[in-house]
Every structure is written in C-alpha cells, then in structure tokens.
Image (cartoon, rainbow, N blue to C red):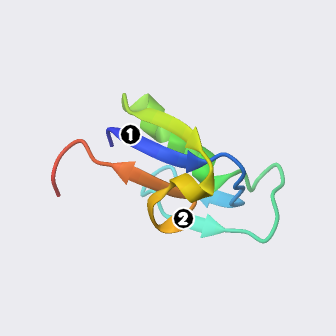
Amino acid sequence: METMLVDIDEVVPGTVDETNGAISFSKSADASNYGVVDEIANRVIRSGGRILGVRRADIPGGKSLAAILRYAM
C-alpha cells in the first residue's frame, strides 16, 4: 500500500491474525482486542507506506479507512 487514509476518531476493536491477516471483530476494546484499523496502519508503516489521519468526511465513501495502492491489482 502506498498511502492509507485513516479516520482519526474511529476505533474498531478486534484482532488481526499474525499468520494470515484474518480480522476478528469484537464488541469492545480491551487488552486482547486492540484497534483493527490501528494494526492495519502499523502494517502499512512497517511496509514503507504512508498514513494520513483525516476526518471520516474526507475519506472516499465515508468509511474508516481507504487505501491508495502502490501497484495495480
């Protein structure tokens, strides 16, 4: 991913599997159910991508996040 837009006010509790990237959502955040969007952002940063924290109204489609891909799919 080249760039990811992230809603700065959004918290999506859950986990991201370390081996296959599967997402498991939770009803509330706690020590074992961290923010899914935060984990995805962390992975983008570790792979050399860029994160922009914006308001939901500034994200195309009004979602929690949007991505600008490095390569065509």
Residue 59 in view: yes
> Callout 1: helix, strand or loop?
strand
Q: Which residue is mark 1?
A: 3
Marked residue nearer the N-terminal end (1 or 2): 1
Q: Nearer the viewer, residue 35 or 5?
A: 5
Q: Nearer the viewer, residue 49 or 14?
A: 49
Residue in view at x 73 percent, y 69 percent: 26
Residue in view at x 58 percent, y 39 percent: 53
Q: Which mark is residue 27?
A: none
Indicate the amino acid at tag 2.
Lys
Relative height, residue 29 to residue 46 (above, below): below
Q: Is residue 46 left or right of residue 10?
A: left
Q: Nearer the viewer, residue 4 or 58?
A: 58
Q: Quadrant of the C terminus?
A: bottom left
- Residue 52 in the image: state x and y as whole percent: 51, 37
Measured Cα–Cα span from mark 1 to mark 2: 15 Å
Indicate the amino acid at tag 1.
Thr
- Residue 43 in the image: state x and y as whole percent: 47, 39
- Residue 70 in the image: state x and y as whole percent: 24, 41
Query: Is disc 2 surrounded by few (<14), some (14 to 19) or many (20+) residues within 10 Å?
Result: some
Q: Nearer the viewer, residue 68 or 14?
A: 68
Q: Which mark is residue 63?
A: 2
- Residue 49 in the image: state x and y as whole percent: 38, 33
Among all residues in the image, which is located at the extreme front? 57
